Image (tube, rainbow, N blue to C red):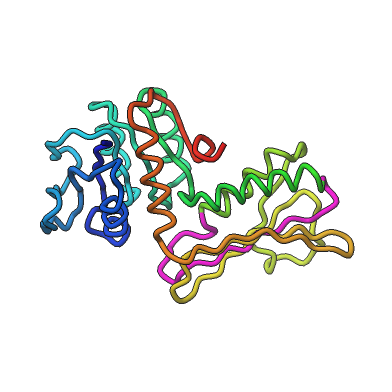
Amino acid sequence: MTKLIITGANGKMGSVIQDIVAKRDDCEIVAGVDLNTEVNGRFPVYSTIDAVKENADAVIDFSNPVLLDDLISYSKRTGTPLVIATTGYSDEQKKKITDASAETPIFFTYNMSMGINLLANLAKKAVQILGNDFDIEIVEKHHNQKIDAPSGTALMLADAMCEEIPEPIKYEYDRHSKREKRTRNEIGLHAVRGGTIVGEHEIIFAGRDEIITLSHSARSKEVFAVGAVNAAVYMAGKPAGLYDMKELID
């Protein structure tokens, strides 16, 4: 039985994770961390990760980027693997995650959905086949409460495709500010914010007289929670290193 600590336990994603874990027989939540320490009747909730008394096999983080340093310190001190599912990290924080993985096991991806990570693999395959004869554009759509743009997932998809492109590629976020033709060595990224859209990503390969589109639509937050729980069960007992969805879908 994999024992889990959930940060952001009393938030929206924390509640979804609780429901998912309750239906599984291979894991259980032994403690939670949240500024709101309201008792839920299932497990104790602490205001900080350092206050947690219970031992666990993995920590699932759906909280806030400001807690990263505390999470890394806790993981290093206790040897507990981290599953980082929070978004909106700065480049400096991403480097901290990478550096910390040399000392402690960390699972980090921009999107916990298995489908999105499959989409990234399909996009890489498309680039291998289509070569440089197709222009690439990414359109992502999210709810009106999302702060960062473009989404971390859109950047993940772009980065994945760039692994298959030999020449340097630039990301174009804002075409309205200039009047010139599209260059060959760019990927356009476009963000839409509105309503309660959970998350939609579309990759457009536009060639001469034909268009190929790959897309993924998340209909609920549950797809991200399921992926995070699967990752946490996978990470139990893993040595130091940086892990991502490749380990779960390969």
Q: Quadrant location of the N terminus?
A: top left
- Residue 128 in the image: x percent, y percent? 77, 42
List the single residue furthest toward the right. Answer: 208
Depth order, front residue of 187/18: 18
Looking at the image, residue 128 sits to the left or right of residue 78; the answer is right
Give the quadrant of residue 233.
top left
Q: Main secondary structure of the magenta part?
A: loop
Give the quadrant of residue 124.
top right
List the single residue furthest toward the bottom. Answer: 195
**Stretch of the chain drawn in magenta:** 131-151
Q: Is residue 186 above or below residue 57?
A: below
Looking at the image, residue 224 sits to the left or right of residue 79; the answer is right
List the single residue furthest toward the front. Answer: 25
Q: Is residue 152 above or below residue 250?
A: below
The residue under the point 51% across, 34% down is: 247
Q: Is residue 114 above or below residue 193?
A: above
The residue under the point 49% across, 38% down is: 248
Q: Quadrant location of the C terminus?
A: top right
The residue under the point 18% across, 44% down is: 31
Depth order, front residue of 23/193: 23
Q: Is residue 239 above or below residue 247?
A: above
Looking at the image, residue 248 sits to the left or right of residue 216; the answer is left
- Residue 116 in the image: x percent, y percent? 55, 52
Looking at the image, residue 125 sits to the left or right of residue 249; the answer is right
Give the total number of marks visible in the rendering: 0
Depth order, front residue of 47/54: 54
Residue 92 among magenta residues: no
- Residue 224 in the image: x percent, y percent? 42, 54
Residue 149 among magenta residues: yes
The residue under the point 10% across, 57% down is: 39
